[in-house]
Image: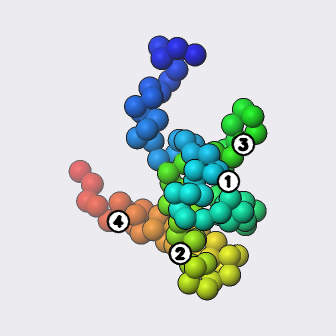
């Protein structure tokens, strides 16, 4: 696919927090975890990595931030299932607060 026919340029993808740019090994290295940890939080449905054409897991920067937060909780002694639930609830709260702030803005 040429750049003219591809909807995003390479530069756009580098700035995209949701672009699945990282392999499992690189993602694990970046957050100081093991591939097994990434598989475990995937099984707990905290994150769902995309798959490459060859079937390999690929992670976005957003997913790595979520995984890093879960790792912090697990490192502090929280069971992985509980850590995943906490991160999900934190994310939901952040989104609710953002929406609430938007709704409070005066219109017009």
**How many angstroms separate mark 2 from mark 1 (CA)?**
19 Å
User: SS class of the residue under badge 3?
Assistant: loop
> Is any atom of residue 4 visible in this view?
yes
Dividing the picture into quarters, in which one does residue 83 lie?
A: bottom right
Residue that numbered label 2 is attached to: 72
State which mark lies toward you, 4 or 2.
2
Q: Point out the tag, 2 or 1, that comes first from the N-terminus.
A: 1
Image position of 70 (left or right of 97): right
* Mark carried by residue 56: 3
Q: Which residue is mark 1?
A: 48
Q: Residue at x 58, y 79 (%)?
A: 75
Q: CA distance from mark 4 to mark 3?
A: 39 Å
x then y, percent, for residue 100: 40, 67
Q: Residue at x 64, y 51 (%)?
A: 24
* Residue 41 showing in the rendered view: no
Find the distance from the CA under tag 1 to the CA under tag 3: 12 Å
Q: Residues within 10 Å of mark 3 (few under 14, many from 20)?
A: few
């Amino acid at each position: 696919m040429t750049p003219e026919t591809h909807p995003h340029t390479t530069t756009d993808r580098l700035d995209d927090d949701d672009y699945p740019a990282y392999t499992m090994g690189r993602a694990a290295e970046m957050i100081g975890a093991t591939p097994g940890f990434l598989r475990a939080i995937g099984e707990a449905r905290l994150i769902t990595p995309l798959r490459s054409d060859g079937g390999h897991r690929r992670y976005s920067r957003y997913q790595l931030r979520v995984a890093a937060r879960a790792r912090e909780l697990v490192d502090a002694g929280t069971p992985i299932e509980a850590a995943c639930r906490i991160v999900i609830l934190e994310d939901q709260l952040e989104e609710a607060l953002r929406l609430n702030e938007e709704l409070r803005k005066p219109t017009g």
